[in-house]
Image: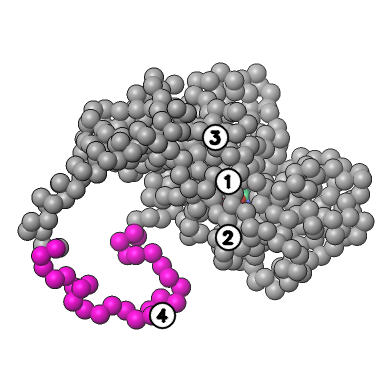
């Protein structure tokens, strides 16, 4: 039997046994339960009519599901970061209002009527597009994750932040609607000497990054919609660059200019920032690709186990800048033994993948980990393997295996087992 079939069988067995136990507990509980035996307000009184909320919001009982920042991480909220509440989400799509935000100069508020996108440099015809012009090009819909290179950066030297929202929440995944960058570059006509594209934002930071022309002509999008509606202001409204599988810093928001050149520009964000200082004092640069990575989102420090032992669901996310996730394994004992997890939902290239491991918890302490493998054959390393290769100075590109310590009472803590 292959691994997937074996894991499916294990799941079905767990499901049948666990399902019977849960149903028995449920029947016993029903006797005298007031929410069943007494008529409740929501059953007695009419609710709001349509249009009480012309733009719908989540239930009031979900008000804790929000982005959060870590105030001491940055000096000022204008050049700062907040984090996606991964522990509250399921599936692979991040709701627009929960996508983490990273700005270097605050959120630019731009009326689309006043927005222009310029292409200049080594092109046959320099061009300026209005938003209306962009809408006349053929567009595509693609699901991609965006991960900041600094995601998990605080965890290089050991466990630090207590929750996957903070250790791994600089990632989101939405369906983008946009025009392939290739079409716009073709319209301008890239000269044969044009080897790089500089993308520039219209925000107060005027963020700029150099992108090799091969990537620009491959799968980059100039996107104006996320999850079907206009980009949120904080995500770059009215238009942002999508650079699939590559570090979030290159996904320039409020995109206003694309310059074609013959060499990289060595801007701030590709020299003093977003390079990786190695143990020998040299720095790696142009480390664009986001490597294969995963994290268990429940249970996790902000989402403890509250139901006691027995049937338990472990759930998490896996992703890779190389393409699809081929397999995810879960360990309950700090990496000694591994069990194949069940990936469920769409498996799309350079998108988040959702995995589950369904099992009977005996109520004892666990050191839970997940380890992803991508279709290119890369396997997520332990943190010791990472540090052996890269030293202790790094911040960016930490894709090491994360460990959560689940205690007998269900509480969960961030620990390092490497
Ligand atoms: N683009 C502009 N113009 N200004 C910025 O500050 N931040 C970058 C990138 N694009 C930034 C930007 C960084 S570091 C990241 S990780 C992503 O945007 C974050 O995208 P998000 O805010 O949509 O999550
Ligand atoms: Co970033």
According to the picture, the residue beneath numbered tag 1 turns out to be 348
Q: As drawn, is 12 to the left or to the right of 345?
A: left
N-term mark: 2 or 1? 2
Say which label, 2 or 4, has the lower sequence index. 4
Comparing marks 3 and 4, which lies closer to the viewer?
Answer: 3
Q: Nearer the viewer, mark 2 or mark 1?
A: 1
Mark whose residue sits in front, 1 or 4? 1
Left or right: 67 in relation to 188: left
Q: Which mark is residue 226?
A: 2
Q: Which SS class for mark 3?
A: strand
Q: Is residue 243 something that shows in the picture? A: yes
Q: Residue at x 92, y 56 (%)?
A: 124
Q: Residue at x 34, y 81 (%)?
A: 49
Decide: is 39 above or below 337.
below
Question: CA gap, disc 1 to disc 3?
Answer: 11 Å
Q: Earlier in the sequence, mark 1 or mark 3?
A: 3
Picture coordinates of residue 284, whole percent (x, y) = 68, 28
Crowding at dot 1, Cα within 10 Å, few <14 / some 14-19 / many 20+, comes out as: some
Residue 300 visible at all? no
Q: What segment is highlighted magenta in the picture?
A: 36-63
Q: Which residue is mark 3?
A: 326
Choose between 170 and 23: the one closer to the eye.
Answer: 23
Expressed as whole percent of the image width and height from the top left, the position of residue 44 reads: 18, 76
**Label 3 residue near ligand 1, CB within 8 Å:** no
């Amino acid at each position: 039997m292959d691994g997937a079939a074996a894991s499916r069988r294990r799941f079905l067995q767990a499901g049948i046994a666990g399902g019977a136990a849960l149903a028995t507990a449920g029947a016993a509980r029903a006797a005298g339960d007031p929410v069943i035996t007494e008529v409740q307000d929501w059953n007695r009184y009419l609710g709001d009519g349509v249009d009480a909320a012309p733009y719908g919001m989540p239930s009031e009982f979900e008000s804790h599901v929000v982005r959060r920042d870590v105030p001491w991480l940055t000096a000022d909220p204008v050049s700062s970061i907040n984090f996606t509440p991964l522990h509250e989400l399921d599936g692979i799509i991040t709701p627009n209002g929960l996508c983490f935000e990273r700005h270097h100069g605050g959120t630019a508020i731009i009326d689309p009527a006043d927005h222009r996108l310029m292409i200049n440099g080594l092109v046959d015809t320099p061009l300026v597009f209005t938003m209306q012009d962009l809408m006349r090009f053929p567009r595509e819909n693609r699901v991609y994750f965006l991960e900041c290179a600094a995601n998990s950066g605080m965890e290089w030297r050991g466990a630090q932040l207590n929750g996957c929202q903070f250790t791994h929440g600089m990632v989101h995944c939405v369906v983008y609607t946009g025009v392939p960058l290739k079409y716009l570059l073709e319209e301008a006509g890239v000269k044969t000497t044009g080897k790089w594209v500089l993308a520039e934002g219209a925000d107060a930071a005027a963020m700029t990054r150099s992108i090799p022309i091969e990537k620009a002509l491959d799968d980059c999008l100039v996107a104006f919609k996320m999850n079907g509606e206009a980009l949120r202001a904080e995500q770059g409204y009215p238009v942002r660059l999508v650079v699939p599988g590559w570090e979030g810093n290159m996904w320039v928001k409020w995109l206003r200019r694309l310059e074609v050149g013959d060499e990289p520009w060595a801007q701030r964000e590709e020299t003093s920032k977003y390079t990786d200082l190695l143990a020998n004092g040299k720095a790696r640069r142009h480390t664009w690709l986001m490597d294969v990575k995963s994290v268990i989102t429940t249970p996790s420090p902000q989402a403890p186990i509250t139901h006691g032992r027995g049937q338990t669901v472990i759930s998490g996310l896996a992703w890779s800048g190389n393409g699809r996730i081929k397999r995810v394994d879960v360990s309950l004992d700090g990496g000694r033994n591994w069990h194949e997890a069940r990936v469920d939902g769409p498996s799309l290239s350079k998108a988040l993948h959702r995995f589950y491991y369904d099992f009977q918890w005996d109520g004892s302490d666990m050191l839970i980990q997940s380890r992803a493998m991508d279709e290119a054959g890369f396997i997520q390393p332990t943190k010791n393997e990472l540090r052996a290769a890269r030293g202790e100075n790094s911040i960016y590109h930490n894709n090491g295996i994360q460990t959560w310590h689940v205690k007998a009472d269900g509480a969960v803590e961030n620990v390092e087992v490497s």
